[in-house]
Image (cartoon, rainbow, N blue to C red):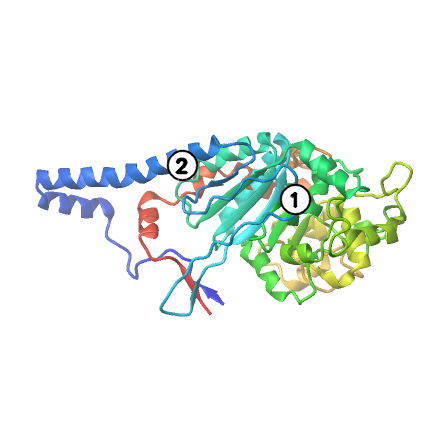
Amino acid sequence: MAHDDTIPFLDEPPQTPWRIRMHESNRRSRTFKRIVTFSALLAIVIPFSLLFTYFHQSSGSSPEDLTVILDVNAPKQPSLPPDHTTPLNVSEHAVQHSGGPVVEVEPIIFSLIMFSYDSASEGAILMKSVLMYSSRPVEFHIICDEVARTYLERRLALVKRPPRNIVVKFYDMPMSSLRARIEREGAIASDHSAGSPGLLKLFIHEVLPETIKKSIFVDTDAFFISDPALLWQQFETFQDQIAISLPTHGDQNEAEWHYASNICSCVMLLDLEKLRNIRLMDSKVYREQDLPALSPPAFTAMYGPPGPNGHYVDVKLGDQGYWWAIVSHRPEILQHLSYDWEVSSCLVSMYGTSLGQDDASDSDELSHQIHTFNTAEEGHVIMPKLVHFNCLNTERYHEWDGWSDPNDDLGRAWGPAVKYHAGSKWLWLNLPPHLYHLNTSLPSRRSTM
């Protein structure tokens, strides 16, 4: 399926703009020029005035509203209920076309979790990288607290002329509501530094409305260095039973973690509709109703019954320990995701990848590639598309001291990429005004089957 999502360009380069304007100006009368100038000002001021009004009305809404930014035509979603025991019932929004077998370009949908200034600081770089490289429209569904939302809104407000449509929806969740949902599950807890917000990964399918049928989840301490549409296309490879795709590591054998390091929940393709249908997580609210939840027998099979404190004992790596129990118990719902999308600093030297030697061949890369033996990637050249800077023991990975240390291997290999993506300005995501007005005056972008 090919998508026509590029900005039109002329076959021949135009004449110098200032010279064209000089000739036109000489031909126009002063009265005509005044009319043109006044009309142009109206055309610019009125739309931006409406957008400004809409943005501030949305920002001033109640904390439990789902605020839409940068897409004034998107339907307003209803408020979240105080508890999140079941998926939200939201009517589907569709755009109908007549006269031919064409469809709108499908957006890439992300579900992200950000609680705190630090996570928003990292997550903003992730979002910025998505917008820098994406060839398709993008939707961000962000489950967050007020601090993270404020941080992101300030930066998103700078993007007034995006080359492609952007939708951002915030799902404000008080920590008390998050803890209450975890308690309704009954037996899970976290030993990880991410705390309760990390466990929220297990409930994304409940928080997002039913109209969102699939999404990409990425930890905040990562960013793209390629088109995220390539990752979104991996959904097309899902067989009927596949509900989740994440990287698997058959070479990681830490028994003290119950082998939970055999997977990484840092980047996941989530078929939210299937996760809802199989009722992934338990809750005392619907425990006796309909289909029993998938997770309790999976958790018990790996960790035994809950201990004296009511929680499963010795679960390591936070949510990843629970995901590992789920996919171990029900392996048919899991599909391996290429390491191209999980080049992680937790693994020494990020599989041996680095910037530099731009003419490297397959054999060159394979000669120093590590941590792929006895994995699904053995013998395959890793082509980094998403880089993940975890395990650095710092609040914000982009401020890690090693990036400025000339003797640090990781800093030398990937420091320039971190500096560029962290420092790239949100303002630079805008199209030049003349191209933006040309772009918005064209018919809706469509793709043909």
Q: Where is residue 431 in the image (x, y as percent from the top left)?
A: 38, 45
Mark pair 1, 2: CA separation: 30 Å
Can residue 199 be seen?
A: yes
* Residue located at (63% from left, 49% from top): 87
Q: Do the residues labelled 1 and 2 touch (CB within 8 Å)?
A: no
User: Callout 1: few (<14), some (14-19), or many (20+) C-alpha neighbours within 10 Å?
Assistant: many
Q: Mark 2 points at which residue?
A: 54
> Which of the pair 173/199 is nearer the observer?
173
User: Callout 2: few (<14), some (14-19), or many (20+) C-alpha neighbours within 10 Å?
Assistant: some
Q: Is residue 302 left or right of residue 376?
A: right
Which mark, by number, is residue 166?
A: none
Q: Which element carries disc 1, helix, strand or loop?
A: loop
Determine whether 148 is above or below 163 in the image: above
Q: Which element carries disc 2, helix, strand or loop?
A: helix
* Residue located at (44% from left, 47% from top): 74
Q: Position of residue 363 (x, y in %)?
A: 68, 63
Residue 231 picture quarter:
bottom right
Q: In this view, does 303 lie to the left or right of 48?
A: right
Specify the amino acid type for callout 1: Asp
Q: In this view, does 20 lie to the left or right of 425?
A: left
Residue 220 picture quarter:
top right
Which of label 1 and label 2 is nearer to you? Answer: 2
Q: Mark 1 points at which residue?
A: 219
Specify the amino acid type for callout 2: Tyr
Q: Position of residue 55 (x, y in %)?
A: 43, 35
Determine whether 259 is above or below 197 in the image: below
